[in-house]
Image: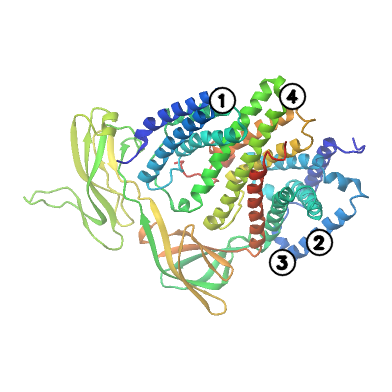
Amino acid sequence: MWSKPWKFAEGITIGAGLILVGLMLQFTIGPIDWRLLAYPFNTILLAIYVLVLGILYAVRKHVYVIEWTMTIYAAVPALGYGVLVTLLMGLSGWDQMLRSWPFTLVYIWLMNILGLITIRRILHFTQGGIVRNLCFICNHLGLFMAMVCGTLGYADMQKYRLTAKVDQPEWRAIDLVGTLMPPKVVELPLAIELHDFTIDEYPPKYVVIDNETGMIVADSPWRIRQDSIWEYAAIVYGCKDSLGNQDMDRYVEWPSMGACTAGFITATRYASAKEAAEGQGSVLETKQGWVSCGSFMFPYKALLLDSLYSAVMPDREPKRYASDVTVYAANNQKMDGTIEVNKPLEIDGWKIYQVSYDSALGRWSDTSVFELVRDPWLPWVYAGIYMMLAGAVLTFITAGRHRH
Amino acid sequence: MLISWQHFPYFAIPSVLLWALGAYYSFREKKTLTATFTLLGIVLFFAFICGLWISLERPPLRTMGETRLWYSFFLPVAGIITWSRWKYRWILSFSTILALVFICVNLFKPEIHNTTLMPALQSPWFAPHVIVYMFCYALFGAALAVALYLLFVPTKRDDENIWNMLDNLVYVGLSFMTIGMLFGALWAKEAWGHYWAWDPKETWAGITWLSFLVYIHYRQLSRNAFRSKVAIFMVIISFCCLQMCWWGINYLPSAQGKSVHTYNMK
């Protein structure tokens, strides 16, 4: 070992050395606080890092370790250690790995290699096939940019949670990145006025449950058919029928706050679960009645089928939830819009996400919870991601061609 | 009439028979017949997916049963693309057998709850993200077969064509994996506010990606000098990481309740 040319053994040793140094740092100075790198330190650090990589590249002929770092003999063990430290995190589920020194040093080593070989390839762009070089640069520089800018930019990322009530403009939010406990409430440079919050739900479902366990039974002999439905209903207890006899509880249409969904169903029992699933065979027994998933005002209602089974309507699944808002930002900027899951609203460098609502009130919620994210380094990370995407396409096109 | 899982056997069994015919003719080196039968099988199988898509009113990509459906679809697709490009005679037999395994799982252990699509999954990114990943899984499945072949038939390790085949499959598989992963990152930014949050699924996707990169870089070194078992094991280990990423984390104790990527677990 350590006789030129260096091979894998040196790389494996260097990686082990980095882990060891990392552990020593971990036990002496403790975990890394990435938030300390906030602007302008991250910008200065990035400039210094790129400069250092340039200088290292310039003096590579004089320092053997740099020359070796730019070979596959360094890349393979570095990637191997990358797999190892990430694998440890994946297996243990220990998130603090991201703040640990061994993890960070291994990834810095990987970034050094990426940086140096990218510089070499850019300076020798015209040699050995333009398309191959372009593919190489997209893959390597893209990853370098995405990872370095993503990591350094983390300190500048702002993330807040804001809870808005209908018709009450709100500008105070909880800082989600800060580690302060109790959470710090801050005043934001923008305000959200919630006009309306709506939930669209999927049509109600009916399932058969086991009376003892309350678990859904997939293969019961009962088949359920919906006869009628009130999307907005209220329960009326102990109604009388047309003959004046005491009737069962029933539901009426009631389009008002707190209404629940109720369905009138017919359940039929077949000889076997298979017959019930197909709806074919002789009907042994029939039951009718109301079932409801309930709401914050009304209880849920099940229909007892027999000693083993009941029919119920599970809580309706949300299909879409959306907030109609007006957002006021600095410099008299104002924007009306709808914020939905997967459809954030963008204003003045902020992205506003729909996160939650008052789940106790469900579709009657007059509250909407948003997350506001601002990440000034995002364009640089995206530039890296798009380069990697281009690189992946070029890799696909060129795979297997330069081999023959 | 709406297509449902009840009709699955009527599409799946003829598809497998057509793929088997294609595989048979690829051994006989009858190119037209190979392509015709395999493509017919693919079209028939895809018709079922489309029918299911229409009747569910959402892309069938959510439950494990539904992703297996795509996997059994993409295996022959990856097979026919590989076959048309490099003319490996065995590849269609392999893709047919593996597709058959996944079809059988769906026939005998369906897990096909007719679940609706929650708001987080309603995005234009949903279909491309999962479909590209499924395609890459299929390619890596083929790469694993080549690696195992080299492992158990040591005399073939001197055959440069087989190594080229393995390299090609990993290269193409990794390009698709990169695209799938980055589509996931772009989607995550729109849905959850950050492109990479080290969620267990993301962490394992990263591990798998790096792991295949180890193989690719190792093979760069010198294609003649490195025909050792090491490269073969790199593919096998990477494939194991892939399985962990795909379904293993559902059972990994340290990942329980942490992942926002679990949609089909109750």
Q: Amino acid at mark 4?
A: Asp
Q: Which amino acid type is marked by label 2?
A: Ile
Helix or strand or loop: what does disc 2 sit on? helix
Question: Viewer-proximal residue, A137 or A258?
Answer: A137
| SS for callout 4 | helix
Q: Is residue A194 above or below residue A108?
A: below
Q: Amino acid at mark 3?
A: Tyr
Determine which residue is flagged by label 3.
Answer: A39
Q: Nearer the viewer, mark 3 or mark 1?
A: 1
Instruction: Please tell me whether mark 2 or mark 1 is closer to you in this view.
Output: 1
Using a 10 Å C-alpha cutoff, classify the residue at mark 2 as few (fewer than 14 neighbours), some (14 to 19) or many (20 or more): few
Q: Earlier in the sequence, mark 3 or mark 2?
A: 3
| Horizontal arrangement in the rendering, residue A181 relative to residue A259 (left or right) | right
Q: Which residue is mark 2?
A: A48
Mark 1 or mark 4, whichever is nearer to me: 1
Q: Which mark is drawn over residue A300?
A: none
**Mark 3 to mark 2 CA distance (whole Å):** 14 Å
Q: Identify the residue at horizontal 29%, vertical 55% (top origin).
A: A260
CB under 8 Å between callouts 1 and 4? no
Q: Is residue B117 above or below residue A50?
A: above
Chain label for disc 2: A
Q: Mark 1: which amino acid? A: Glu
Viewer-nearest of labels 4 and 3? 4
Say which chain tag 3 marks: A
> Are the residues flagged by discs 3 and 2 from a single subunit?
yes
Look at mark 1 in the image and give the residue it sits on: B29
Seen in the picture, residue A235 relative to B50 is either above or below; the reply is below
